[in-house]
Amino acid sequence: MNDIDDQLRELLPRMRRFAIWLTRDPSTADDLVQNSLEKALSRWGDKRPEGDLRAWLFSILYRQFVDAHRRSRRYSRMLELFTGGRGDDEYEPSVERTVVAQSTLEAFGQLNTEQRALLLWVSVEGLSYKEVAEILDVPVGTVMSRLSRARQALRQMSDGEITLPSLRILK
């Protein structure tokens, strides 16, 4: 274990330098490195013994950064959708946007617990299908089909489903 500690100590400055390069903020970089090390230590059993420790840690750090970036973009998009705002004070949300947002929130509240959890994990938290499958202990395909049904239910309940008019074939 001492050898592992030494390797981790040696890699910390490199990880921090890479994280600063990604985030452009030392404080955020430190948080990213800490989160990455926590994830690595919690998944130490998943690491391939023949694999390169440095590459494994950098891949975790990069995935943590990408996931956090996606998550923050999703949060801002959801905030914009539900508040109707675009960030400038002069913008007044249209009545239509407000009604759609309220309808979507009400519909979301009517979904069953599993559907709400799936939508939150994937759409808001940015978890991959594989990560959600591990949480629920089900195959990835099951997650995909349940998520599809949850999205369809949300569209139907919020009256946001776009239905195409049926076309008749004339002879």
Image (spheres, rainbow, N blue to C red):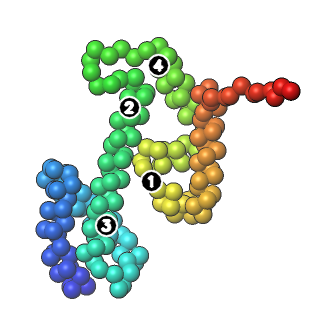
Q: Amino acid at mark 4?
A: Thr
The quarter of the image holding the C terminus is top right
Question: Is mark 4 in CB contact (under 8 Å) with mark 3?
Answer: no
Q: Quadrant of residue 57?
A: bottom left
Above or below residue 8? Residue 68 is above
Residue holding disc 2: 79
Q: Residue at x 23, y 61 (%)?
A: 34
Q: Is residue 79 left or right of residue 30?
A: right
Q: Amino acid at mark 3?
A: Ser
- State the separation of the CA atoms marked 3 and 2: 30 Å
- State the separation of the CA atoms marked 4 and 3: 41 Å
Q: Amino acid at mark 1?
A: Leu
Q: Secondary structure at mark 2?
A: helix
Q: Is residue 122 left or right of residue 137?
A: left
Most extreme residue toward the right, as rendered? 171
Tell me, yes or no, if residue 153 can be seen here: yes
Q: Position of residue 61 (x, y in %)?
A: 28, 63
Disc 4 packing (10 Å; few <14; some 14–19; many ≥20): some
Q: Residue at x 57, y 61 (%)?
A: 140
